Image (tube, rainbow, N blue to C red):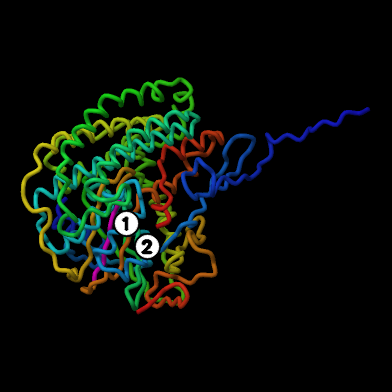
Amino acid sequence: MEEKTNTVSLENQEYVINMGPQHPSTHGVLRLVCSLKGEIVQNVQPHIGYIHRGIEKMCESLTYQQIIHLTDRMDYLSAHINNEAVCLTVEKALEADVPERVKYIRTILSELTRIQSHQLFWATFGMDLGGLTCFFYGLRDREMVLDIFEETCGGRMIVSYNTPGGLMNDIHPNFQKRVKDFIKYFRGVIHEYDDLLTGNVIFRERSMGIGVVTKEQAVAWGMTGPTGRASGFSCDIRKHYPYSAYDKVTFNEVLHTEGDVYHRYMVRMEEMRESMNIIEQLIDNIPEGPYTVKMKPVIKLPEGEYFQSVETARGELGVYIVSDGNKNPFRVKFRSPNFVNLAPLNMMSKGYKIADLVAIGGSLDLIIPDIDR
Amino acid sequence: MENTQLTAAIAALVPDAEVKHGRQFVEVTVKSEKILAVMETLKETKDTSFDLLVSLTGMDWGTDLGVVYHLRSTVFNHMIVVKIMIPDRENPSADSLCQVYPGAEFHEREVYDLLGIRFNGHPDLRRLFLDSSWGYPLRKDYKDDVNIVSK
């Protein structure tokens, strides 16, 4: 009997597969339409908008205090920093002087936010590449930061702790002690992160030399945050345009020049240590004073245009508010870091294997609600 | 460069632009058909070298549509705002910046999606978030009786 063999080769013909919108490695509802030739990626087209809520349109019918609660829902891992961005813009427009105490507390909370965001990145990135243990270790430590948030802000992820002019409430009496305990604990266990993943041979093989972005490309595409800094693009807003208490602390901007997946990961690992340094410089020196300045219940910004950038865990978040003098803004635009970092995905992953696409996507640390807004 | 120096430098580079001091940045308003040439000049000139497109915002000013560009120089760390006005509401269009700043690709698709401004020379101008059954929600005259509750 003649044996039937399948002789169709997929190596030389191009075909299209669909990744997402419910694929575990896309971290949300992102759909990637990939053209492949064999295993090699030819073209990637991101399809977004599955959770587009029209936040910019909604802002036009809300007051400035209400907008803050919407910014939590953009990049939910940098919720506190997003709140701060809107508050800084409003304060800049009103030329309001914020008490020193507020600046210190905001900076400490921003850096705690950055640490827990990078912890979750480490946890999920390890999982994307097949190291499931990372997920448990990462979430174990992140839980401690979320408990600090819960005690002081009342919320764990969606904090909404900033208001124009200050903070919702004063910090909890336990705050300083718990933060110091956490730093002491985390300095003791962060080597486990390196032991588990950074030195792992399989991980290094899968991440080194993959998804390389040069500095010129990073600038041209506007890639900021750890993604840009891994390519040697010095783009840290905290360094170049200091806000809150960042001009009172010394810290290093983490820069690498290789621009591959591994170094995007390394930037985040080193940033966690830098964040701990920043917190340690501030936590014992929080000045006494009021936790907010008195603001009118209805805030009307003077007519004009205002722009403020902050450094979230993923890059530069720009808030652009156009006011016509009413209690609602005329137009609000959020320049979200994830949206800009997603655009060059096609350029970055061309010529690599489909499995590398998962590593590249993971190394961008995309948060989909921030892309869709 | 400081804002006063920037004003002088830009007035020399782009003679027919309207340059004014905003609250934070120098604001340059140029004719919409010249935007591509102006951006190339601002990027290539050594003294200004605005090589980073920070943000690209589509605007509906009520009567005119417009686009607002926030540029930054990674060499000098100075910032500038460039604006264009598009009076034609029926068929608005402007030149795409994709060949100067590749990162403009997604920004322009977003503006096309939400405000309906077409960008000439864009490599892949499709709607980004919404499907074609929607209008252009960020326009001020957008009406949606079902999904938007108006007081």
Q: Secondary structure at mark 1?
A: helix
Asked where in the image residue A187 lies, by quadrant, the reply is top left
Residue A55 numbered tag: 2
The residue at which mark 1 appears reads as A71
* Quadrant housing the C terminus of chain A: bottom left
Give the total of numbered labels. Answer: 2
**Magenta stretch holds residue A16:** no
Determine whether, in the image, residue B37 is placed left or right of residue A347: left
Is residue A119 something one can see in this rendering? yes
Task: Give residue B113's position: percent from left, percent from top.
Answer: 46, 64
Task: Give residue B64's position: percent from left, percent from top.
Answer: 35, 75
- For the residue marked with disc 1, what is the amino acid? Thr
Name the residue at 54% across, 44% down: A23
From which residue to which does the magenta span run?
A317-323
Mark 2 crowd level (few <14, some 14–19, many ≥20, 10 Å Cα): some
Mark 2 / mark 1, whichever is N-terminal: 2
Task: Give residue B130's position: percent from left, percent from top.
Answer: 50, 63
Q: Nearer the viewer, residue B2 or A276?
A: A276
